[in-house]
Image: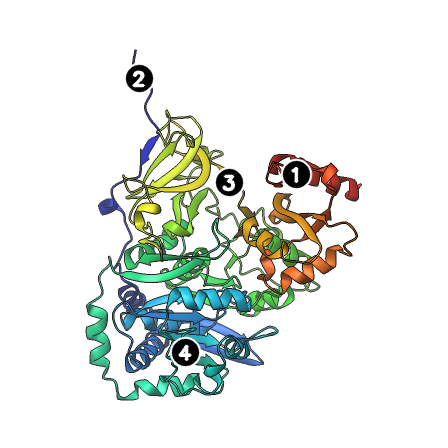
Amino acid sequence: MTDQPLSIVAGPPLSEEPGLGTLTLSGWLREVTSRSGPAEALVMHEGGSVTRWTYDDLWARANEVARALIACGVGKGTRVGVLMTNRPEFLSAVFGTALAGGVAATFSTFSTPAELDHLLQSSACHVLLMERKVLKKDFAAILTDLEPAIATASPGALAAPHFPFLRYIACVGGGDGMIEHWASFLSRGDAVDQALVDATAATVTPADPGVLFFSSGSTAKPKGILSMHRGVTLQLWRWKRFLAAKEDARAWSANGFFWSGNFAMAIGGALSSGGSLILQATFQPEEALTLMERERATMAFAWPHQWAQLEAATNWNAVNLSSLYYVNPANPLGRHPTVNTDWQEPMSAYGNTETFTISTIFDSGTPVERIADTHGAPLPGNIFKILDPMTGHVVPLGERGEIAVKGPTLMLGYIGVPLDESVDADGFFHTGDGGWFDAEGRLHWEGRLNDIIKTGGANVSPIEIDTVIKSCPGVKVTQTVGVPHETLGELVVTCIVPHVGAPLDEEAIRRFAKAQLASYKVPRRVLFFSEDDLSLTGSAKIKTADLKALVIKQLDAEAA
C-alpha cells in the first residue's frame, strides 16, 4: 500500500520564469523607461490642471529626487518615508529612493496622528517625503503637533528624541520650519553629479532591502514588513503576464500605492507593459468615471465596495466607457452599457503582504477547467506546505490546514522582530490562513484561521479596534468581529456591553473610534448587548463564534 503524499507543493524553478528583467527597483525603472521613453507613463488631473509625464520624464524626476536625497545624506539602506496619495511625486519619491540606495517606507494617508507617530518612530526614517493636505487632513499640522520642534527647526537640524533619526521633511504643498517646499528640496540636489547617482544605484543588489510596507496583520499596531528588491521587482514584472497586458494598458486606480497589492498590480501592470497610469488621489466615484472617459482608460483597479459606488454614481449612465477592455465582464464596469469585453480577470489568486502579494495565481487566459473553483497554482520559486495548526506537522495532500509558504518574494522579516520568530526552522512563513492543495497542485484558500477581518480589500485587526474602543468611558466589554457582506467581503461590527447607566449610542462610539483609527478600521456597525445576551469566557471575553451568529441574527432582524 502506497503512503498518501504530503501537502508540499512547489512552483516551477524561478530560472525558468519568462518575462523577467533586472531585479532591482532602479534597474526595473531603467528598463521600462528606456524601452518606452517618449510614451506617456502617467497622467493626473488636479485642481483644474493636468500633469502628464512620459517615461523619460519619470526617469528624470526620479533621478532628481535621488540627487536631493544624496545631498541630504541618504546612503545605502537609509530609510525614506513616503506619505502621499497616488500622484506623480509618489513614484518619483519611491524610485528616487531606490536610485539613491535607500529603502522607501510607504505610509498610509489614512493614518491617524497616533498611527503616523508609530509609523515614523518604527521606520526610523531619515527623510520624510509627503503630501501636505489629503482631504481634511493637514499632515504638516499633525507632524508639528506630534513634535513641536518641527515648526521651528531648520532642515537637517532637528534634534528631538521623539523622532531621533528624522532630519529632513519635504512636502508637496509646502510648510514651515524644517518642512521644505518640494521645489526647495529638489534644488538641494543641484550640486550632486548624476554620475554619483548612477554609481550608487549600481551598488544595489536584488538581495538588498528595497521597500518597507506596513500592514495591520494580527497585532494592535501596524507591522513593518521589509522586502528585498528581488521580491518587489519580480511582482512588478509578473503583473504584465498575470493581466495579459499590452501597451494599450491605461490603468485607472485610486487605491493607495502605499499598499503592496496596488503597488505591484497597478504600477507593474501598467508600466511593465509600456502603458500609462491614470492617477486619482482619493476615490470619488463621479470623478473616477469622468477620468476613465476623458483619459480613455482600458484598465481599472478597484475594491468590491468601490464597484458598487461607481455603479451608483450620478453620472453612471452618462459616461462613455467604451475604451475599457481589461475589466471583468461580471463587474459593474464590465456590465456598463458602453463596454464590450471578454477579458478574463486573474481573480484565482492568493497572497500576503509578507510575500509582496501574489504567491499563487492563474494568468488571464487560463482555461476555465484548469482554474475550476481554486486560488491558483504556486508561482515559480515558491514552495507551500499545509500544516496541522495544532501539531505543526505537514498534513496529507487534500487535507485542510494552515498555509505556509517560502520563496523568492518572501519578506526579509518584520522590523524589530527576530527572523526566527517570523518563520519556522525550514524558512516557511506561517500565514494564519486555512486551505488545502488538490492533486493538480491548485490551492483552495478558505479564509483566516484567526479573527482578522478582510473588508474592502484591507486587513483589519479586531484587536486594534477593541484596544481603542475599550478606553471609551462607559464601555465594559468590547469585541469586534467580521460578518459576511456582499460588497465589502466582511462588515466590521463592534459589539459592546456597556456599564450600567452609561449614555452610549452607536454614533458616539463611531466618533470615538474615528478620532484614533483610520477610516476603513472604524466599525460600520456598533451593537449593544447585556452580559446575559452573550457567552463569556472566564476572562470576560466573548466567544467569537457565538457572537458572530448573534450579530448576523440581529442584522437580519433589522433588515426584515
Does dot 3 land on a helix, a strand or a loop?
loop
Label 4 crowding class (10 Å Cα cut-off): few <14, some 14-19, many 20+? some
Disc 3 versus disc 2: nearer the observer: 3
Residue type marked 1: Leu
Tag on residue 160? 4
Q: Earlier in the sequence, mark 3 or mark 2?
A: 2
Residue 338 shows in this picture: no
29 relative position to 352: left or right: left
Q: Earlier in the sequence, mark 4 or mark 3?
A: 4
Q: Earlier in the sequence, mark 1 or mark 3?
A: 3
Quarter of the figure that contains the C terminus: top right
State the residue position of label 1.
547
State the residue position of label 3.
450
Label 1 crowding class (10 Å Cα cut-off): few <14, some 14-19, many 20+? some
Q: Earlier in the sequence, mark 4 or mark 2?
A: 2
Residue type marked 2: Asp
Residue type marked 3: Asn
Residue type marked 4: Ala
Disc 2 versus disc 1: nearer the observer: 1
Does dot 2 land on a helix, a strand or a loop?
loop
Task: Tell me the distance, in whole angstroms, between the alpha carbons under discs 2 and 1.
Answer: 41 Å
Label 3 crowding class (10 Å Cα cut-off): few <14, some 14-19, many 20+? few
Task: Tell me the distance, in whole angstroms, between the alpha carbons under discs 3 and 2.
Answer: 31 Å
Task: Tell me the distance, in whole angstroms, between the alpha carbons under discs 4 and 2.
Answer: 63 Å
150 relative position to 533: left or right: left
Residue at image x 28%, y 39%?
A: 425
